[in-house]
Amino acid sequence: MAATSFADRLAAAIDRVGSPACVGLDPVLEKLPAEIRASVAASDHTAVARAFVTFSRGVIDACRGRIGVIKPQAACFERYGAPGVQALHDVIHAGHNAGMIVVLDAKRGDIGISAEHYAAAAFAGASPADSLTVSGYLGPDTIEPYLKHAGRGLFVLVRTSNPGSDAVQSLRLADGRTVAEMMADHVATIGAPRMGACGLSDVGAVVAATKPADAAALRARMPNQVFLIPGYGAQGGTADDLRGLVRGKRENDRPSSSGLLVTASRSVIYAFKDGEARWADAVAAAAAGFAAEVAGIVG
Amino acid sequence: MAATSFADRLAAAIDRVGSPACVGLDPVLEKLPAEIRASVAASDHTAVARAFVTFSRGVIDACRGRIGVIKPQAACFERYGAPGVQALHDVIHAGHNAGMIVVLDAKRGDIGISAEHYAAAAFAGASPADSLTVSGYLGPDTIEPYLKHAGRGLFVLVRTSNPGSDAVQSLRLADGRTVAEMMADHVATIGAPRMGACGLSDVGAVVAATKPADAAALRARMPNQVFLIPGYGAQGGTADDLRGLVRGKRENDRPSSSGLLVTASRSVIYAFKDGEARWADAVAAAAAGFAAEVAGIVG
């Protein structure tokens, strides 16, 4: 399976559910449904990890058929040490069992042999992810090791929405490009020889939609990249902002042709009220609403 | 203990052994001593993790009294999943038991709440590291969450030695600075209010010594930062290159006053010949030689 291009597998998952919506799995103990977090002490990492798996499986079940892509946040799991990492693997496995594409949001970045180890951790273990978020600050050569794993994809950090991001990514180079645009050009170059049959590259980019003009300029430089858009509804970015990032219309357009992968986390996975017994129903409704909203944006 | 400034604890550890030398723990199964790797299958993550702990403990014992700082490479451990992460924690614990400062080389970088989770993973678990390597591409605000852990330190990626690093870090901004110099200025600003009594900041920088002119320009912008110099002997950088990065001489100079922390990994931890029974003796000799060499450079 993994030998098929990541972009093609991603496109198939998106088109199967009819929406390029992605649900971020960012479990935090104090926000879990009451029945799951009950009697779990934060200091008991094994118990927290077990609760994360129970919750994530519930979210995945609630999203089944509505959402084609999940994005577990590695940091949430790693803070609970080895049991947390085991839980992360269990969640990746559960996502695959539900027929979903899994983007591991771990934002790794190191040189040479260390990048190879991180790539193996993400793509060659018992529960390999389909794609990984990575940082390119150390240079384009540090992205290549991940691409030795056939059929796996990447999302390179290009433009984020946090207040301090401008102080690095918006700075202008002597050649007129911003730092983010420079990174975008690297991504386009690395991604060019890794095109799927769907017309999208296995190498995508993390691009926040909160600065529409900046993001549109990045789209011009990365016409074949899937834009992983973080934090829809939380980190900002309106439907109109996203419409401006859809790739140029083509024949037989499908939701995947938009080249967007729009992520929401908290607004979906914590859609229930505290103490609500049928919490999974609330998550299912939020997932359906989110998927429909994103489908409408790219449709 | 951790409430004391990281910089002061680092300086004490360096001055106790008389050298700002740091040994990188980058365990790789096929390079382990024959007696340790014997009958360990790469697919058996628990067995590999156990072998890494045995080896790392042996290296730490061999370095005791000679080396004050170790730097485990997270990627090497993480590729073996949850057992690997447990092994990493065991190695951090062993380093502390030997009185060493532990720099966790994990190169994390994420925004807001995710950075808080990574900080908790590094600094608030059962085996907290003393310091962590981080990426600043997402902006200076993404560095702050790690600094909420009193007495813990950071090394921010500024300049690396890999061939592709120039394609990002050497680019010139419209204001005349390089991208690396821009990052250095952020590091100096973030580090300014976090000064130890020793005159060094808790916020240091990863700076490769392979481009001496570039590195000297970075020293001018970061006079109070400890420079974590990677890969001495492997990634290049000569003694003369390093001498140019020592901070201006002050009264009562000690090895820590140099503001350098010079790392070697493979040349020390794999100093034995394949099949050599007394492999730890070879590591001890290499560690002593490395420490003396670095002491000579900064002395």
Image (cartoon, coloured by chain):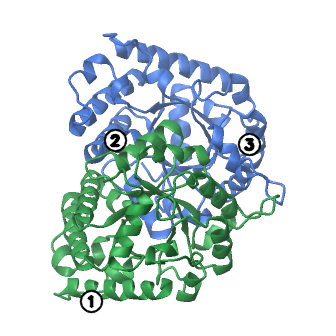
Chain colours: A blue, B green
Q: Tell me the residue that label 1 is attached to.
A: B273
Specify the subunit that label 3 lies on. Answer: A
Task: Name the kind of residue labelled 1 in the image.
Answer: Lys
Using the rendered image of the protein, determine whether residue A103 is visible from the camera's viewpoint: no
Q: Residue at x 26, y 62 (%)?
A: B96
- Helix, strand or loop for disc 3: helix
The 10 Å Cα crowd at callout 3, few under 14, some 14 to 19, many 20 or more, is many
Task: Establish if A216 lies above or below B233.
Answer: above
Q: Tell me the residue that label 2 is attached to.
A: A88
Task: Establish if A287 lies above or below B48.
Answer: above
Q: Residue at x 41, y 58 (%)?
A: B6
- Helix, strand or loop for disc 2: helix
Total count of labels = 3
> Comparing marks 2 and 3, which lies closer to the viewer?
2
Task: Establish if B263 lies above or below B131.
Answer: below
Q: Quadrant of residue B265?
A: bottom left
Say whether residue A169 is left or right of residue A150.
Answer: right
Q: Which of pointers 2 and 3 lies earlier in the amino acid sequence? A: 2
